[in-house]
Amino acid sequence: MDFRLTDEQELMLESVRELCAGFPETYWQECDANERIPAEFMKAYADSGLNTLGLPEELGGIPVDNMTVVLARIEMGRMGVPVFACGTGMSTLHMIREYGTPEQMKMCINKLKLGEHVSALGSTEAGSGSNTAALATCYERNDGKIVINGSKTFVTNGGVCEYITVIARNIKTENPRKAFTAFWIPTNTPGISMEHMQKIGQNYTRTCNVYLDNVTVDESTIIGSEGNAFIQLMKGFENERLMMCANTLGPAIAAFEDAAVYACERELFNKRIGEFQMIQLKLVDMKTKIENMRNMTYKTAWMLDEGMSIKSQAAMAKRYCVQTAFEVIDDAMQILGGIGYMTDHRVSRFWRDARFFRMGGGTDEIMATIVGREILKEFSR
């Protein structure tokens, strides 16, 4: 594995830095404080073409490998951009790219090019978070149409996106691996209603409950083939978990850099606080953790680019990286002291935003379960 950057990757990162430099911390503070979608950044992101990294050229994208996509997301995070809020809708985009119709893919790309959110994902339910097989939202066929009933919770940008991807169960199919189908549905379809939810971080996105009351759609809304949504969703989550590693690594690097600069400037007892061994130890541990996060993230991206399965690797990397990123950001806040706890310092924003990743895309505990099962399979005789 050779992780040296190519000339093309260096140029791409220069473009990322140029884009992000136009949106100072005050911009993100305003979006955060007012729970506002960063529409201006999303438009500039789209105009730069960077939000189509990794998509095929024939679809209007920039065909690069997963490593390059990861590098871009890390750098955006290091520049203070909450990249998770910027409209790509990783799970839905992956599902439609891999399994959707040309028309669905075209609509996705058009959304990206306009700087809009691709789609909300309606997967989680109040009674089935990590246990996807227990999803209760169901559908049945009636006079050539498909009728969906149920509810979804913790739906990111449900009230913002023009489409929502709904995972629903065929009430006549018992095998959970063959019972679920993904539907890409306009959010203005009759029978869909939403309820806004308040949260402590990631305020540049909207989170809501979604209710589906006799929502009637046709065959064209199905993503892929009927009954295969379980496999489609799991594959999408593998990719999303890799991107979550990148999404948390960037802010961890930024928080470390802020803390290191502060330790060199802040004086206490007639010396810079960076000269105290306890502060140095924190900085050393933070840097070590960042290197470990970087290595795990890069390796996972490399494996995906080499066509290798990342089921276990992505789960292991996601569990380690999101936990460790929060630890690094928390230590940065400790070094910064009261300044880091104030809302006008970006580390306090990183701290609130980072906590979500230990739940989103699969909890820490589920990541451990996935990896643990794979270990037992490997060593069972």
Image (cartoon, grey):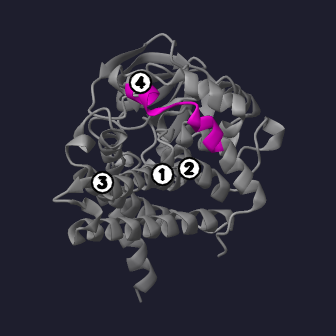
Residue name at image x 81 percent, y 42 percent: 57
Of 115 and 331, nearer the camera is 331
Quick one: SS at disc 2? helix
Among the two numbered marks 2 and 1 on one chain, the one whose residue lies closer to the N terminus: 2
Q: Give the amino acid type for the residue marked by disc 4 in the picture.
A: Cys
In the displayed structure, 253 sits above or below 372; it is above
Q: Which residue is mark 2?
A: 75
Look at the image and say whether residue 23 sits in the magenta stretch.
yes
Mark 2 touches mark 3? (CB < 8 Å) = no
Q: Give the amino acid type for the residue marked by disc 1 in the picture.
A: Gly
Near mark 4 (Cα within 10 A), the count class, few <14, some 14-19 or many ≥20, is: some
Quick one: SS at disc 4? helix
Q: Which residue is mark 4?
A: 31
Q: Which residue is mark 1?
A: 250
Among the two numbered marks 3 and 4 on one chain, the one whose residue lies closer to the N terminus: 4
Residue 107 x %, y %: 69, 26
